Image: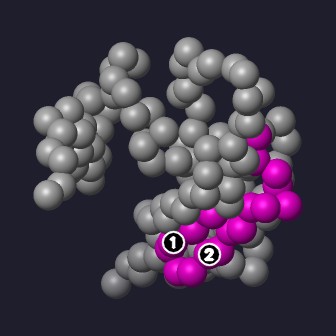
Amino acid sequence: MINWNLFREMDQMRREMDEIFNSVGLGSLLEPAFLPGLGARRTPRFNLLEDENNFYLSALLPGVDPKQLEMNVVGNSLTLSGERPEQVADVNATWHRRERGAGKFLRTIELPADVNPNKVSATYKNGVLDVTLPKAEAAKPKQIAIKVA
C-alpha cells in the first residue's frame, strides 16, 4: 500500500494550479516570496523587447557555464537549454534555506514574429545572456505607396 501524504498532495495541487495560471498569463499573481518550490518556476527568467528590426532577449543565468548553454531558433521559437550545477555542501553542514534552483533546464519562448536564424547573435556576461534576434524580412513592416488616380 502506498503511503498517502496530505501535504505532498496539497503541494502537487498548488503546482498544478500555478501551471494553469501561468499558462494564461496570471502567474505573477501567485508568486509571493513565502511560498515553497521557487525552483519549480519556469527558468530561466527573461525580458523580451523589440524595435523595428530586432527582438532583444535578456535571460538570467547566474552560475551557468556558458559552454553548457544551447540555443536553437526555428521560425518564431527560441529554445534555451543548459544546466546549473548543484551546490555541494560539506557533509557536516545543515541547510537552513535552499531557494536557488539547480539542475537541467529547457525553456522555449514563442516570439511575436519569425526571425532570421542566420543573423542571431548572443553574448554572455556576468550571468546574463543577451540575444539579438533580427526579424525575418517577411515580419518587418512594409510601407505601401498609394497612387492617386
Q: CA distance from mark 1 to mark 2?
A: 6 Å
Marks 1 & 2, CB-CB < 8 Å contact: yes
Give 123 or 119, whichever is nearer the viewer. 123
Vertical comparison of 147 with 38: above or below: below
Q: Which residues are magenta?
A: 63-81
Residue visible at 61% across and 58% down in the picture: 104
Three-letter amino acid code of the residue under disc 1: Ser
Is 12 in front, or is 59?
12
- What's the amino acid at mark 2? Val
User: Residue 65: where, in percent of width, then height?
Assistant: 82, 51
Q: Is residue 74 magenta?
A: yes
The picture quadrant where one finds residue 100 is top right
The quadrant the N terminus occupies is bottom left
Q: Residues within 10 Å of mark 1 (few under 14, many from 20)?
A: some
Which residue is depicted at the point 44% across and 33% down? 38
The correct choice, above or below, for 117 with respect to 85 in the image is: below
Give the residue pinned by disc 1: 77
Question: Which residue is tagged 2?
Answer: 73
Identify the residue at horizontal 71%, vertical 68% (top origin): 70
- Is 101 within the magenta? no
